[in-house]
Amino acid sequence: MNGAVDRPTRGEVEAQIANAVGRFQREQQGRGPTDVRAHLVADLVVVRSTGILTQTETILAGTPEGARIVRSARQELRSIHHEEIESLVFVGCAVLRSYYDMDVAAAEQVEIYALSANADGLVRRPDPR
């Protein structure tokens, strides 16, 4: 069978990554984000999650000190679990490293995964029909 046909499309890979990241966040935080979007961009995967805060974090984030605590706790958890989350981002090549940042006031986070290869060669283009 043709290898190109066996490969998933860009949209399929992006959906798989978004679902895996959302599931991981649900397991770690007790609730998942309201929306997760993943995008393959050359040798990067960019994941943006919105509506990420728990009810307790939302209350804490109401003060500057509380927002600092929420941000610090989330960053520490991400640091502890980075290898686990990186293993979920499977696009047919290795994740070399990942980066994470969040905006507490917006209740959103962005993750960037640096890949060992350009993802364009790892996915197939959908039929133009």
Image (cartoon, rainbow, N blue to C red):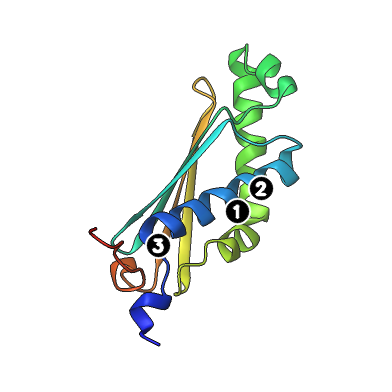
Q: How crowded is mark 3: few (under 14 residues within 10 Å), some or many (20 or more)?
A: some
Please report contact status of discs 1 and 3: CB closer than 8 Å, yes or no: no
Q: Which amino acid does label 3 sit on?
A: Ala
**Residue 119 figure quarter:** bottom left
- When the figure is inspected, residue 57 is found, relative to residue 37, above or below; the finding is above
Q: In this view, does 22 lie above or below 52?
A: below
Decide which of tag 2 and tag 3 comes sooner along the chain. 2
Q: Name the residue under label 1.
A: 20
Q: Distance between the residues labelled 2 and 3?
A: 21 Å
Total labels: the figure holds 3
| Circle nearer the N terminus (1, 3) | 1
Q: Quadrant of residue 88?
A: bottom right
Q: Name the residue under label 3.
A: 114
* Residue 60 quadrant: top right
Image height of 77 relative to 115, above or below = above
Badge 2 marks a residue whose secondary structure is: helix
Q: Is residue 120 left or right of residue 95?
A: left
Which amino acid type is marked by label 2?
A: Arg
Q: Give percent across and percent down for residue 51.
A: 57, 27
**Which residue lies most toward the top here?**
62
Whether residue 71 sits left or right of residue 108 in the image: it is: right
**Dot 1 amino acid type:** Ala
What residue sits 62% from the left and 48% below the top? 78
Q: Could you say which is closer to the camera, residue 118 or residue 72?
A: 118
Q: Tell me the element at label 3.
A: strand
Instruction: Name the residue that disc number 2 marks.
Output: 23
Q: Label 2: few (<14), some or many (≥20) within 10 Å?
A: some
Which residue is at 36% across, 72% downward? 122
- Please identify the residue farthest to the left as the structure is shown: 128
Q: Which of 68 and 28 is in front in this view?
A: 28
Q: Position of residue 102 (x, y in %)?
A: 50, 34
Crowd band around label 1 with a 10 angstrom C-alpha radius: few (<14), some (14–19), many (20+): some
